[in-house]
């Protein structure tokens, strides 16, 4: 990840000094002095070795005029983490509940209407959903703020929009597994004993649904933590995704490298935690001596 990101950002067209100097510009002599000061005059291999040494020492570099990348990254990641947690909780609650209800009453009028509704959220682009949410809840009804990340109220709209697609995916998977579980002998036996439907669903069916749901939630949560770039841009949410776009646009090499490495760590950890969770949810996958 470090090698690929380093090569891509340094081989991309354009001069990082143009963004650094702004509209004022500078002469070639002044640019040479600044380039030497920033270490941009060294060959790529020398700059990469220097970067790896700094990375191993915990130094993520700095952005001229803005300060250390690590401080900015901590602040932006905290904002994105709040958004990701809120979105994934909404996705799990809405997705599992609607999936269980639709699967238990499969092919009913409620289930058919629900599937059409979920298809809309799976297919709709995030930026389109975000703009509609802004139009309805911020501009038309004036219920929620349209932009920013200062208060909990600023979290509601982006979290709802961000949760829409994973909630729809979770619901569809939960529905399919509920239909399959309903025909299993242990569920039929519970129904024959006269157990209430809600108790059968919560005690038996939910266990079957939990494993595929964990897979979807784990990977979506990693993606959300990595920065919901489009959602944060639409709502001007000061998170990691918006910071990544800003860093790439301005060619802040240290910031782009730091964000890319953080994303890689998040995805690896998410995959690991999802795999480990299987052994707790399903005893059959545990190693047997």
Image (cartoon, grey):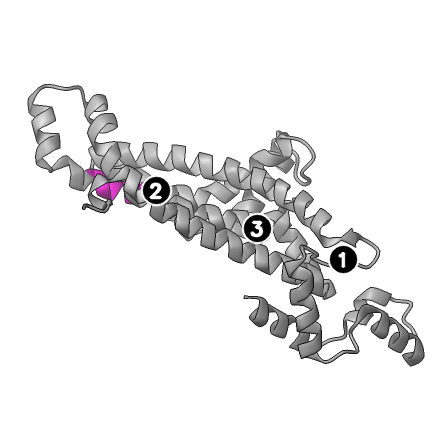
Q: Identify the residue at image location x=53%, y=41%.
A: 84
**In the image, residue 176 lies in the stretch drawn in magenta:** yes
In primary-sequence order, the first of circles 1 and 2 is 1
- Where is mark 1, residue-wise? 62
Pointer 1 with pointer 2, Cβ within 8 A: no
Task: Name the foreground residue: 29 vs 84.
Answer: 29
Q: Say the numbered circle drawn on residue 270.
A: none
Q: Residue at x 43, y 46 (%)?
A: 165
Residue that numbered label 2 is attached to? 277
Asked if residue 144 can be seen in this view, the reply is no
- Whole-angstrom CA distance, mark 3 to mark 1, is 20 Å
Judged from the image, the secondary structure of the residue bearing numbered disc 2 is helix
Q: Secondary structure at mark 1?
A: strand
Other residues around mark 1 within 10 Å, as few (<14) / some (14–19) / many (≥20): some
First to last magenta residue range: 171-178
Mark 3 surroundings: few (<14), some (14-19) or many (≥20) residues within 10 A: many
Is the residue 27 above or below the residue 238 in the image?
Answer: below
Question: Between residues 23 and 254, which one lies in front from this camera angle?
Answer: 254
* Real-space CA distance between mark 3 and mark 2, rounded to the nearest whole angstrom: 24 Å
| 16 to the left or right of 271 | right
The residue beneath circle 3 is 227
């Amino acid at each position: 990840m470090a090698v690929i990101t380093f090569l891509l950002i340094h081989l991309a067209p354009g001069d990082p000094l143009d963004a650094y100097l702004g509209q004022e510009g500078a002469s070639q002599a002044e640019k040479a002095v600044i380039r030497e000061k920033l270490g941009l005059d060294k060959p790529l291999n020398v700059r990469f070795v220097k970067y790896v040494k700094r990375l191993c020492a915990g130094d993520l570099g700095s952005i001229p005029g803005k300060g250390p990348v690590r401080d900015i990254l901590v602040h932006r990641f905290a904002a994105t983490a709040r958004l990701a947690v809120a979105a994934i909780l909404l996705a799990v609650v809405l997705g599992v509940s609607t999936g269980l209800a639709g699967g238990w009453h499969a092919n009913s009028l409620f289930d058919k209407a629900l599937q059409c509704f979920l298809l809309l959220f799976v297919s709709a682009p995030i930026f389109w959903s975000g703009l509609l949410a802004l139009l309805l809840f911020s501009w038309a009804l004036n219920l929620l703020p349209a932009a920013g990340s200062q208060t909990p109220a600023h979290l509601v709209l982006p979290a709802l929009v961000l949760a829409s697609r994973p909630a729809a995916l979770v619901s569809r998977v939960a529905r399919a597994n509920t239909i399959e579980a309903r025909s299993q002998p242990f569920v039929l036996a519970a129904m024959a004993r006269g157990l209430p439907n809600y108790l059968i669903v919560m005690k038996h069916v939910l266990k079957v649904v939990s494993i595929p749901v964990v897979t979807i939630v784990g990977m979506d949560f990693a993606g959300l933590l990595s920065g919901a770039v489009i959602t944060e841009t639409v709502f001007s949410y000061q998170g990691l995704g918006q910071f990544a776009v800003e860093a790439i646009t301005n060619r802040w090499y240290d910031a782009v490298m730091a964000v890319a490495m953080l994303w890689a760590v998040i995805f690896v950890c998410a995959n690991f935690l999802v795999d480990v969770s299987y052994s707790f949810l399903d005893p059959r996958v545990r190693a047997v001596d």
